[in-house]
Image (spheres, rainbow, N blue to C red):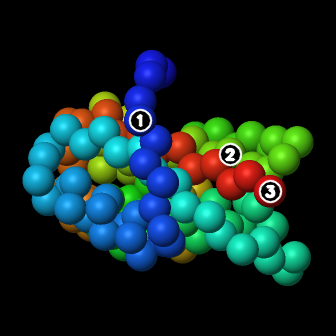
Amino acid sequence: KGTYMLSQYENAQCLFAALRASFKSSNDVQFHGSYLVPEDPITSEKERVQMAALEVWRTTGYRFRVQHNYPLKTGHKTILWCCQDEDKKQKSRPSLKEGVKHRDTIGMKRFCHEFQIQITILS
């Protein structure tokens, strides 16, 4: 929480280019940006949030999981936590199904950064 400057970008490409540059230049990224998207009657606000989260993953290389979904009167808001945060690692839960082969897999690289994103789509 706190005050921040919200940068308005011309389009998604400009926003994600700026996000990529922020991640390359610093380990402590504070990024607040927005861009206008034409309304699409076929795609829900929640689906548009999911598409934006996927693009953040592609841009930054960090994976996220949904912490909270908030339907709004005028859109949708989702809070996501980084899956690669050491402090938020979930314990593995072996399958209880019969005949399942448990495999030793190498986990993803973990970081100590308390990284979260909030994506809000307003209509």
Q: Position of residue 25 (x, y in %)?
A: 11, 53
Please tell me whether residue 6 is drawn above or below residue 17 in the rendered image.
above
How far is mark 1 from mark 2, CA to CA?
19 Å
Q: Position of residue 98 (x, y in %)?
A: 59, 67
Instruction: Indicate the amino acid at tag 2.
Output: Lys
| Front residue (pair 95, 106) | 106
Q: Is residue 70 left or right of residue 60?
A: right
Please tell me whether residue 6 is drawn above or below residue 83 in the rendered image.
above
Q: Residues within 10 Å of mark 2 (few under 14, many from 20)?
A: some
Q: Is residue 54 left or right of residue 57?
A: right
- In the rendered image, which residue does mark 1 sit on? 5
Location of residue 103 (image quadrant): bottom left
| Front residue (pair 78, 74) | 74
- Of the numbered discs 2 and 3, the one sitting upstream in the chain is 2
From the viewer's perspective, is the residue at label 1 or at label 2 nearer?
1
- In the rendered image, which residue does mark 2 sit on? 77
